[in-house]
Amino acid sequence: MSAALIRLRRNPALAIGSVLALCIAVVALFPGLFAPRSPVAIDMGRALQPPSAAFWFGTDHVGRDIFSRVVHGARVTLGIVGGSLALSALIGGLSGMVAGYLRGLTDLVSGQFIAVILSFPPIFLGVMITGILGSNVANLVLALAVVYLPLFFRAARSAAMVECARPYVEAAQVLGLGDGRVVFRHLLPNVVPAILTQYIILFPLALQIQAALGFLGLGVQPPTPDWGASLQESKDYVLFASWTAIFPGLALIVSSLAVILIGRGLQSRD
Amino acid sequence: MARFLLWRSAAALVTMLLASIVVFAMVRAVPGDIVETMMGQMGSSEGEAALRRFFGLDQPVHVQYLDWLGRVVTGDFGTSWRQGSPVATLVLNAFAVSFQLAFLVLVLSSLVGVPLGLVAGYRAGGALDTAIQAFNVLFLATPVFWLALMLLFGASTFLHWSPPTIYMGPLRALGQNLVILLLPMLSLAFLQIAAYAQFVRQHVIEAMRQDYVRALRARGVPSAAILRRHVLRNILVPLITFMGLIFIQILGGVVVIESLFGLPGLGRLLVNALYARDFPVVQGALVMVLISAILINLLVDVAYRAIDPRLRT
Amino acid sequence: MKDNLTIDRRRLLQGAAAVPLLSLFGVPLMATGARADDAMLYGAGDPAAKRGGTLTVGSLIEPPSFDIYHQAGEAVNFVAPLMYQTLVYADHDGNPHPLLAESWEVSDDVTVYTFRLREGVTFHTGQPLEAADVKYSLDYMRDPENGTIGALDFADVAGVEAVDPRTVRVTLSKPNSAFLITLTHRNASVIPRDWFAGEGARAALNRQSVGTGPFKLAEFVQNSYMRLERNPDYWQPELPYLDEIVVNFIPNSAGMLVAVRNGRVDMAVLVRPQDAEQLEGVGNLTVQRSRSLNQKSLDLDSTYGPLSDERVRKAIALLVDKEAVMQAAISGYGQVLGTMVPGMQERWGVPLDELATQKVDVEQAKALLAEAGHPDGIDLELRTIIGYDWMEPAALALVQQLAQGGVRAQIQRLDLGTWLQNFRARQMGFTLNDWGTPPDPNILYYRHFHQRPEGADFRNWDNAEASRLLDAGRQAKAFEERKAIYAEFQKLLSESAPTVMMFGADHIVVVSDAVKNHAMHPIGWHFGLVKTWLDR
């Protein structure tokens, strides 16, 4: 414990990032504790009010409390990004590991498949998938998972290949241990860190894409208080009620910042 | 080199072909077709059938695909179903807008970002480095479209200024063209400046750790000379790879902010065509994106080989 | 001739006071015949008008193409009348006036319409207008094999005959007293004969216009702008006042508002009326507000789950607070509706207090739901269309209102293509809808609410009584008789609730001080620009 604390002290990026992430996580897990009002209840009588003591972040075009929407949005937005990346890591990581272990035809075919996905710039792929399947949470998660699949695949594949070159894997194969055992006993523990690193690196990027899709109107269904979707709704009011756009944007920035700082902190550890 | 080029191009072609199937399949998976949006609420069923025949939508999907592919291979992307104009013209015009903006951003961000990264890396740990790093982290975390919104808001509120509403190409009116692109360029540039600075900083720090650089410094060679002659040369190769990646990323960013600034670029073309179910245009736009992404990757690989003697065989 | 002079003079003498009178006499006049009354075309003229100048208009929506015969959409409707003309023009009150026709005769059984064409009219292609062109245009449009959008509007046309170069006779298979108004829609635009027989004729319409209108298409750049030029050979020599109109397509409200505010455009049509609030107090700008022929409605498909029960539909209608939805959707810049669009309410509408389900009654709604076997309420998916800005806040307000009576609605946003597919397949579900009409109740109701196959019955209402009334209203000749029939229909509509017409958004046009004599037509198409001029 104390060693960890000392490390944090030596590494301000990691420290700031961790504290921020912890705060955001608490807000995302228990939004009810922080949000004074409903994130969805509308009240036209108080539409587009500037920030005040009663409404810290002001109100939006249908009179919802922006502070409450931002607080509740943490769970929605970060949940979608975290969940889709986890899905992507699981599928991409596993298939990458298997491809890196088996090589041969499996590797060639899956590699080609991955190359096809990679040849689409992420935002185009996201637009196409959500645009075609319809915009809702499930399709948004799917879109983000597909977009980042190749990167997890590649990370897992190269980690697996490095491990495969080690003598003990060869030994295990010679000893006649089944492929499954080799993969899960020996490769997995070594591939997981590579996947986790990738996860942290990709999180802020995925957050940007998620928000961009929401901003293009391809995100979650209203009245879900997603940050990107809030920005989409507020873009028509930004000139005369800038608070409607400023605060959801700041929430995005702070969340990205937290993860970027953690990533940097971990990198500069060595 | 020739063998590498050949092999690499063949792989790119296979990817292209597979991707074209994916594109076509995705586009045909869109619910509804152009006949719906053309006829609106008041269409008749005979009329619908007639229009479907007119567009060839009554054919089986694989026939439509092969037909399309056959023509694309000969450079014929067909005509827009809505407007009858050639898809190639529409897509190239839109691509030119996006490409110009992305290119300007690339130039601007490398002109600012690379020196920032050099300074930060050379004086790693100093006050200037800390400031530059803070800048990097902040703008890496800021969504491009949000920055765009804020710039639009700021310019209109504080400067009482907004960009002209009609886009003009650089060949038609360069001055107005640059004025129109000013805000979009700024919105996109900050993120990329940060990305460049961070990337270059990292590599400078690594290069400075190399034994021969240490030896040079010990011998009293001026640091500017070391930076220019040795460090810069060393990071040139990774920088080119990075530029390729960043260019594709910028294109993505352009697409998100185009409609905010009313630019007639690729993203707006794609989204509007997708909504109208103008399939030839959607397909054409996507293929254009694919070609450029795959070409850029190919170019990067080739440039990489050409510059780095270690990779030559 | 004499008849017309009287009307002309009455108009001139009495000015605005003549309007309600005309509303009454307009229809009998229409049934017997009419002659040209050019001063009334495209709104009132302005003796002080200066000619020349380029008007820059900002538009949030963009026409997908200018193929007026095959491409539906409001964005096409907006600008098509500037380039293309029809036989008949409907004025702001819904009275028909001869446009390309000079006069007409209508048979007593309202089945034969004979038009005398104007002399000296030429198409943008240089050809003179003749009866054969009118015959070709109407025949092309009414043949569904051509994939035209208005074919169903002309399904009852039995034949079009070019009697002589200046006379066209249209024979209907069923009496239709609204046919003149049907002819005011751009679907009935007249183009040179055999136009579509030419190679690439459809695509060519995006490069050139081939109508007879006061403006010609000069340039159309997709996702950017379109430019119209004065037609130097236009048959009303004093018109148009402007030399040029440039329409900028600005894809979002924020961009539009900064453009208006900073003088980048002279005129902007605000699709979201509430944006006008954001321009209050900005100098050099005037906000024009006028009634429309448009309605924002909540549609209930009678085959969608519990909505098949009339009591459930009625319960939903009783839960809708139209005023509050309008407030949420467009900040109140509109008119609450009963069963008639705002621009026709005075002439055709039943007063709201004589209609059922116009006042919120949560208790009665709950009782109706319980009676229909849903004491615990029902779950529905409420559809909205992406790109229709008013729908999202309206849906949010509706969800709250409906919840009070136990109707749990989940918002589902669809893009227009998917939505239209559902709509035309008569699977519209429970959805918000946005539509307008030329000013006649037959055109407003028949397609939407008559049983199939004569109507399209998009909501699967399948109501025989309603169909009977709609047939009667179409055949009746006298205005009073028609009005009584349509009043009965409207009462039925409010009782059975296949749709809840909520409100009509007003037209909000922001113009700079240089823009003179602009009046928006209730239908929202840019007729008014023909007589708009610039004072710079």
Image: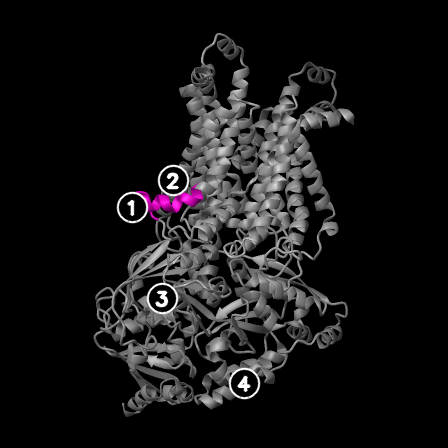
The percent coordinates of residue C316 (x first, y second) are 66, 72
Residue at the extreme top of the image, as rendered: B219
Instruction: Give above or below for C275 relative to C455.
Output: above
What residue is shown at x 38% (from left), y 40% (from top)? B100
What's the amino acid at mark 2?
Gln
Q: Secondary structure of the magenta portion, mostly?
A: helix
Q: Which residue is mark 4?
A: C487
Query: Residue C119: where, in percent of width, then height?
Result: 22, 77
Question: Which mark is in front, 1 or 4?
Answer: 1
Say yes or no: labels 1 and 3 on the same chain: no
Of pointers 2 and 1, the one earlier in the residue sequence: 2
Residue located 59% across and 75% down the image? C462
Camera-near label (4 vs 3) is 3
Label 3 near label 1: C-beta < 8 Å?
Answer: no
Measured in 3D between alpha carbons, the distance from the residue under mark 3 to the one under mark 2, in whole angstroms, is: 37 Å
**In the visual, does B287 lie left or right of C121?**
right
Q: Amino acid at mark 3?
A: Asp
Q: Which residue is mark 2?
A: B100
- Residue beneath label 1, please? B172
| Residue drawn at (54%, 85%) of the image | C487
Q: CA distance from mark 1 to mark 3?
A: 30 Å
Element type at mark 3: loop
Task: Please provide the residue range marked out in magenta.
Answer: B168-185
Spatial separation of the CA atoms under disc 1 and disc 4: 59 Å
Asked if residue A15 can be seen in this view, the reply is: yes
Q: Chain of mark 3?
A: C
Q: Which mark is residue C479?
A: none
Chain identity of mark 2: B
